[in-house]
């Protein structure tokens, strides 16, 4: 139980940094969806989809490989230095390639656009710089997690987000206002009002540089040589994770890219639809935060308790807590969606109907992440590739077939189906290789109860009507509190948390 309390404590720190950071970052959603045209917001969504893919290539699965080998090695610094130098060289080489071929990349991105100002070559240069720096800081961040320093991790993450948020407001709010009154001032001399997108990327670059500087102690601990006897087994372990990561990113972000190619109409109108879908995706952030915070703490934790005699029972308890928490998050968001929707601009709210679908999809993905520990512990990471490849096939196939018919709604349902199938596949295969006594009936009970309360809350909206919003919100909040009470009583009546 002490180990579970430690996991909960570390999850709280990682979660606090993620939640507070994302909430600060969330200040940008109302800003971006009110300042930026839908088309520009679509460009941002598209570029960050590409960034997510390329980040996987740069890291090459070495983050998880570092956890796997450093948690067992006597000389952890040798493993750390090998992982860091490998990732740094990959990042430098690939970022240089992106910068070198910036013009062909830009030409490919802009193919078919009517407005040539939609894409700028500076976007590609900034993308290359951001990718290089973020990859370089990934292994030092992993070291902080392995060293059980969640406070330091949280502090640096928060600094990154604060810098990013600050410069977004500086460029998108302060500069336009100040330039209108003092166009020759030093503070706005560089500002060009015609292109807001570039300043979002500049803010990201400044935040990434800040992170790099704050990790200087971890970077200075790197020994400037690669341990070749360690590198080969690490690469063998990491290679399946690279392909699994790419396939996983297909499931997570490829829809933003496929929408551009398979939606009907001009590319400008497609980017507008991507912008609306991207804004709706932001409202599923609460489930994503829970999954991200949990993964940050759980991955090193799972490896450390693997040798304990009751490891399987520990994993089962962790799963139960995770399902309870995520079901509560889903219901909490959907019973307060009338207020949460104000986070995005009115022009973007036509995509709100996909929010519950995306929340459920992220819930299933979080369960899959819990289940995936069996193949990581058993050095069978190729199974991760198989599962995510299965998901990628579903993602690509359904999106390509359904987007021309149903638009971005098809992408939301495809994400849900993809993660649900991956979850089931990982569970059934995992129980054959590494049986864990997961409480399936209990998890199913919470899930069905959550859905029942959700549909009841939706029926109240039809019965009461949005005209009486205060009364409606009180009733829906009451439903949410009732769910929490039932979950509390059900799990505590037999002292299962003891």
Image (cartoon, rainbow, N blue to C red):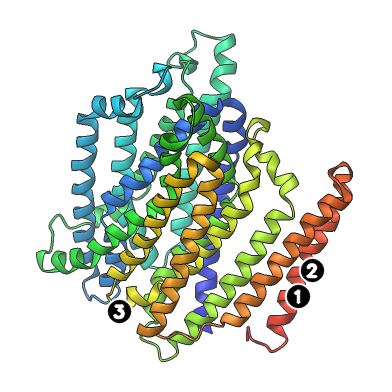
Q: Is residue 69 above or below residue 201?
A: below
Residue on which the image places disc 3: 378
The picture places residue 76, in percent across and down from the top left corner, at 24, 69
Secondary element type, mark 2: helix
Residue 482: mark: 2
Using the image as rendered, state which of residue 211 and residue 268 is in the foreground.
268
In the rendered structure, which disc, 3 or 1, sits on the residue that comes first in sequence? 3
Q: Is residue 155 above or below residue 237?
A: above
In the rendered structure, which disc, 2 or 3, sits on the residue that comes first in sequence? 3
Residue 486: mark: 1
> Is the residue under label 1 in contact with that under label 3 (CB below 8 Å)?
no
The picture places residue 6, in percent across and down from the top left corner, at 50, 75
Secondary element type, mark 1: helix
> Is the residue under label 1 in contact with that under label 2 (CB below 8 Å)?
yes
Residue count near mark 2 (Cα–Cα under 10 Å), binned few <14, some 14–19, many ≥20:
few
Using the image as rendered, state which of residue 240 and residue 195 is in the foreground.
240
Please indicate whether residue 382 sits to the left or right of residue 225 in the image.
Answer: right
Q: Is residue 351 above or below residue 148?
A: above
The picture places residue 477, in percent across and down from the top left corner, at 80, 58
The C terminus - image quarter: bottom right
The picture places residue 440, in percent across and down from the top left corner, at 56, 80
Residue 26, located in which quarter of the rendered image? top right
- Per the model, the C-alpha gap separating discs 3 and 1 is 37 Å
Residue count near mark 3 (Cα–Cα under 10 Å), binned few <14, some 14–19, many ≥20:
few
Q: Is residue 238 above or below residue 460?
A: below
Residue at x 25%, y 55% (from the top left corner): 60
Secondary element type, mark 3: loop
Residue 120, located in which quarter of the rendered image? top left
- Per the model, the C-alpha gap separating discs 2 and 1 is 6 Å
Residue 400: mark: none
């Amino acid at each position: 139980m002490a180990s579970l309390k430690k996991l909960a404590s570390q999850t709280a720190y990682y979660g606090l940094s993620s939640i507070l950071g994302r909430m600060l970052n969330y200040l940008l959603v109302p800003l971006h969806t009110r300042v930026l045209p839908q088309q520009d917001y679509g460009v941002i969504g598209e570029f960050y989809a590409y960034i997510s893919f390329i980040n996987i290539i740069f890291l090459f699965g070495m983050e998880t490989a570092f956890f796997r080998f450093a948690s067992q090695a006597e000389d952890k610094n040798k493993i750390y230095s090998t992982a860091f130098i490998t990732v740094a060289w990959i990042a430098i080489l690939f970022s240089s390639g992106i910068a070198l071929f910036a013009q062909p990349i830009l030409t490919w991105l802009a193919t078919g656009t009517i407005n040539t100002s939609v894409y700028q070559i500076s976007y590609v240069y900034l993308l290359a710089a951001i990718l290089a720096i973020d990859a370089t800081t990934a292994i030092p961040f992993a070291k902080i997690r392995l060293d059980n320093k969640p406070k330091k991790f949280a502090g640096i993450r928060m600094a990154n987000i604060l810098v990013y948020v600050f410069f977004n407001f500086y460029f998108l709010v302060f500069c336009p206002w100040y330039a209108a009154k003092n166009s020759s001032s030093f503070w706005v001399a560089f500002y060009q009002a015609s292109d807001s997108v570039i300043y979002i990327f500049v803010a990201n670059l400044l935040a990434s540089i800040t992170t790099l500087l704050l990790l200087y102690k971890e970077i200075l601990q790197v020994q400037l040589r690669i341990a070749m006897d360690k590198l080969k087994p690490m690469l063998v372990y990491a290679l399946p994770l690279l392909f699994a990561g790419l396939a996983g990113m297909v499931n997570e972000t490829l829809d933003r890219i496929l929408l551009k190619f398979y939606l009907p109409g001009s590319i400008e109108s497609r980017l507008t639809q991507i912008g609306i879908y991207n804004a709706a995706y932001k409202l599923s952030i609460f489930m994503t935060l829970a999954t991200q915070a949990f993964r940050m703490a759980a991955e090193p934790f799972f490896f450390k308790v693997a040798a304990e005699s009751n490891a399987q029972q520990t994993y089962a308890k962790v799963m139960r807590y995770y399902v309870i928490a995520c079901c509560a998050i889903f219901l909490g968001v959907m019973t307060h969606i009338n207020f949460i929707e104000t986070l995005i601009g009115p022009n973007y709210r036509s995509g709100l109907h996909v929010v519950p679908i995306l929340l459920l999809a992220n819930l299933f993905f979080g369960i899959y992440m819990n289940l995936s520990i069996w193949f990581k512990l058993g050095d069978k990471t190729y199974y991760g590739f198989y599962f995510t490849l299965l998901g990628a096939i579903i993602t690509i196939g359904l999106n390509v077939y359904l987007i021309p018919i149903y638009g971005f709604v098809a992408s939301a349902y495809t994400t849900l189906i993809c993660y649900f199938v991956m979850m089931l596949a990982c569970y059934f295969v995992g129980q054959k290789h590494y049986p864990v006594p997961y409480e399936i009936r209990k998890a199913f009970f919470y899930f069905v109860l959550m859905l029942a309360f959700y549909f009841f809350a939706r029926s109240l909206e039809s019965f009461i009507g949005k005209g009486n919003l205060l009364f409606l919100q009180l009733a829906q909040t009451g439903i949410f509190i009732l769910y929490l009470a039932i979950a509390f009583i059900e799990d505590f009546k037999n002292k299962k948390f003891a």
